[in-house]
């Protein structure tokens, strides 16, 4: 299975410089797909597309954005089994868990974004003045491998709901479910440039996102080291940075524990 293109400006495009990575099924330790690894030039192309799209998308009405979200939700629901199978292949979750928990929870983020958006007050009076909540701009989103689609959805859904545009770097270890989501977003009629996806390594694509002057906010779920690097790179252009870092949900098995039961129950 070759998925060697990136989704930029409403189309699947070849990378500027060809570089290929095998995607490995952790259950078999065998390669089952290939993706391209992006470069600074690919991020630059995606960021410029997102910046151009922001001018129009940020001015869309709530009703227009709800329409996009509802069509994404419909496409997501229709593809839940396929999305579950993809996550099983790319990161090893059992098929039932991948479909009924991981894919379903990812869908919830889009459903919740639509629910909140329907009644959200972007303007409200405060004393003699007015509070106006505006989309921040182009959002660079960096996500991990362990809950790949959930983490993507939890960042992409609110960005689209609020009128922001997106450059997404999913984990290069588990990229295929995110690429399928890109197809769902495309089929939902989301305008070109609103959602962009570039695969690649963190020290290349992730750092290019964090340092790009055309990106206004970075949201990363990843390691503490990666988060520190992103924050430092983002500081030069005073980006807003949101981080969820480090392995904070470890299973701690004490010496007197039943190891077989602990591993089975997770």
Image (cartoon, rainbow, N blue to C red):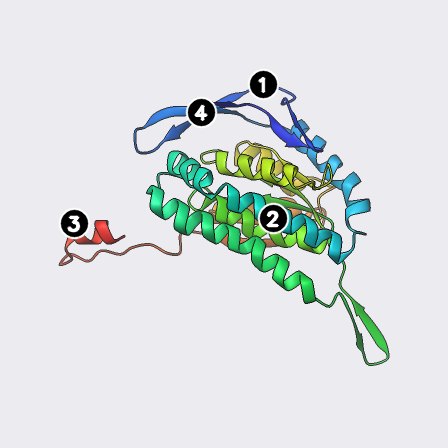
| Residue drawn at (57%, 59%) of the image | 112
Q: Do we see residue 230 in this rendering?
A: no
Q: Are marks 2 and 4 in contact (CB under 8 Å)?
A: no
Calculate the distance from the C-alpha at mark 1 to the C-alpha at mark 3: 45 Å
Label 4, on which residue? 33
Q: Nearer the viewer, residue 214 or 238?
A: 214
For label 2, count other residues whose C-alpha is less than 10 Å away and answer few (under 14), some (14-19) or many (20+).
many
Residue 224, image x and y in percent? Answer: 48, 49
Q: What residue is shown at x 40% (from left), y 51% (from top)?
A: 101
Residue where numbered disc 3 is placed: 260
For label 3, the SS is helix
N-term-proximal mark, 2 vs 3: 2
Q: Secondary structure at mark 4?
A: strand
Image position, residue 36 (x, y; %): 54, 24
Distance from the alpha carbon under mark 4 to that under mark 3 = 32 Å
Residue for point 63% across, 22% down: 14
Q: Could you say which disc has been placed on residue 156 in the image?
A: 2
View extreme (bottom): residue: 127
Q: Which residue is nearer to you in this view: 228 or 20?
A: 20
Comes first in the chain, label 1 or label 3: 1
Pointer 1 local density, CA inside 10 Å: few below 14, some 14–19, many at least 20: few
* N-terminal label among 1 and 2: 1
């Amino acid at each position: 299975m070759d998925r060697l293109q990136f989704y930029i400006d409403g189309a699947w495009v070849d990378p500027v410089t060809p570089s290929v990575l095998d995607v490995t099924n952790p259950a078999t330790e065998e390669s089952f797909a290939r993706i391209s690894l992006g470069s600074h030039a690919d991020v630059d192309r995606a960021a410029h597309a997102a910046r151009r799209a922001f001018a129009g998308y940020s001015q869309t009405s709530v009703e227009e954005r709800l329409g996009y979200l509802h069509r994404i939700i419909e496409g997501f629901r229709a593809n839940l089994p396929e999305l579950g199978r993809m996550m099983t292949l790319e990161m090893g979750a059992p098929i039932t868990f991948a479909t009924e928990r991981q894919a379903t929870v990812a869908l919830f983020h889009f459903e919740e974004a639509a629910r909140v958006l329907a009644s959200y007050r972007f303007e409200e009076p405060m004393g003699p003045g007015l509070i106006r909540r505006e989309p921040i701009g182009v959002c660079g989103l960096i996500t991990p491998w362990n809950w790949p689609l959930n983490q993507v959805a939890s960042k992409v859904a609110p960005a689209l709901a609020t009128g922001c545009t997106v450059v997404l770097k999913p984990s290069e270890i588990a990229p295929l479910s995110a690429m399928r989501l890109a197809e769902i977003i495309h089929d939902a009629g989301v305008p070109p440039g609103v959602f962009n996806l570039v695969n690649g390594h963190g020290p290349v694509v992730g750092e290019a996102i964090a340092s790009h002057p055309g990106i206004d906010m970075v949201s990363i779920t990843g390691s503490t080291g990666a988060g520190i690097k992103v924050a430092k790179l983002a500081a030069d252009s005073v980006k807003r940075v949101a981080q969820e870092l480090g392995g904070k949900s470890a299973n701690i098995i004490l010496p007197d524990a039943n190891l077989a039961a602990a591993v089975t129950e997770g």
